[in-house]
Image (cartoon, helix red, strand yellow):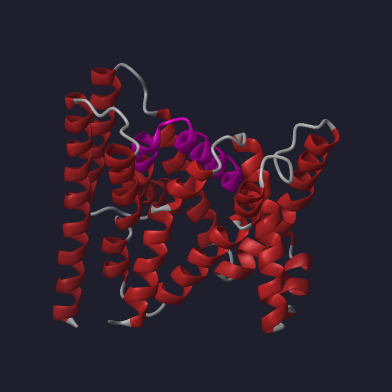
Amino acid sequence: MNKGILHTATAYILWGLLPVYWKAIQKVPAAEILCHRMVWSLVFILILLGLRNHWNWLKKAMKNRRTLVTFLGTACLLTVNWLTYIWAVNSGYIVEASLGYFINPIITVLLGVIFLREKLRPWQWVAIAVAACGVLYLTVGYGTFPWIGLILAFTFGFYGLLRKTASLSALEGLSLEMAILFLPALTYLLFLESTGTAAFGHVGLKTSILLAFAGVITAFPLLLFASGARKITLTRVGILQYIAPTLQFLLGIFVYHEPFTATRWAGFSIIWAALFIYTLEGIVKRKRVRFIQ
């Protein structure tokens, strides 16, 4: 198998199975899990940077005000995204969380139109309109606004938008983001420790180990993705990206037995139709470009 496909697919599989990891420590509050994820991610990344002796980028980044402001923004977006996702998984909303990553590609395209003045082709507009109908149907039919999915989709969409303008690699960018978040996260964990409400070191060895390895499960898939995505076409990346939300969806339904009514089936089906239109349109467009070339 092509190494690019293998690495990219593995990254999406790991992201798709992430709910299993968070469920294993669901007794720990989401905010505390989030802070451990930030702290241990930086520790793990610093080890990687040290092994590679890859520090030359840091001085230049620290002197660039635009870079710092950009990554302050991405760090804040990651905080909201990660906290929402961890809370959703451990509160029994894995299926709704998967919705966010199903519609994220379409949200990303829409943000490109609004902020980068990119032009959409007719069938891309159709995909966006169909997806909007799906969200509206879920809101009206199910009686609640799908805020979890939309928060995840928009925060990750804006995250991608900001990262698009940054020059740092995946590892460098995550390093800077975790460095920005490290002190607030560590301060909160020390506060929990001082009040006697911290989980780490107090609720069992297994939980403490899983909290510490939150850094590994954060950085490792990202590195796989960064390695794989450079070796394969954007079309293949676009198709493979649906592995993660599909696995999350299946876990929510068949492993954790979350309720999924006929109304939700209908709403999700409309959104899946939008994704089909969007993906097929992209494949056809790229094939035409290749044929012309």
Q: Looking at the picture, does residue 285 appear above or below residue 24?
A: below
Q: Magenta includes 225?
A: no
Q: Quadrant of the C terminus?
A: bottom left
Q: Work out whether residue 33 or residue 70 is closer to the camera in this orientation and state it.
A: 33
Q: Work out whether residue 238 or residue 42 is closer to the camera in this orientation and state it.
A: 42
How many tags in the picture?
0
Q: Magenta includes 94?
A: yes
Q: Looking at the picture, does residue 232 appear above or below residue 130?
A: below
Q: Looking at the picture, does residue 215 appear above or below residue 84?
A: below
Q: Where are the magenta residues, as a range?
A: 77-99
Determine the image quadrant of residue 94: top left
User: Which residue is depicted at the point 61% across and 50% down?
Assistant: 206
User: Which residue is depicted at the point 77% across and 66% down?
Assistant: 62
Q: Position of residue 187 (x, y in %)?
A: 81, 43
User: Which residue is depicted at the point 19% across and 65% down?
Assistant: 283
Q: Position of residue 81 (x, y in %)?
A: 53, 43
Please state if 223 lies on the left or on the right of 237 as rendered.
right
Per the picture, the main secondary structure of the magenta-coloured stretch is helix
Please state if 205 lies on the left or on the right of 293 as rendered.
right
Q: Position of residue 63 (x, y in %)?
A: 78, 67
Viewer can see residue 184 = yes
Please state if 163 lies on the left or on the right of 108 as rendered.
right
Q: Work out whether residue 160 or residue 11 is closer to the camera in this orientation and state it.
A: 11
Q: Position of residue 114 (x, y in %)?
A: 41, 45
Q: Which residue of the protein is positioned furthest toward the right in this rendering?
A: 194
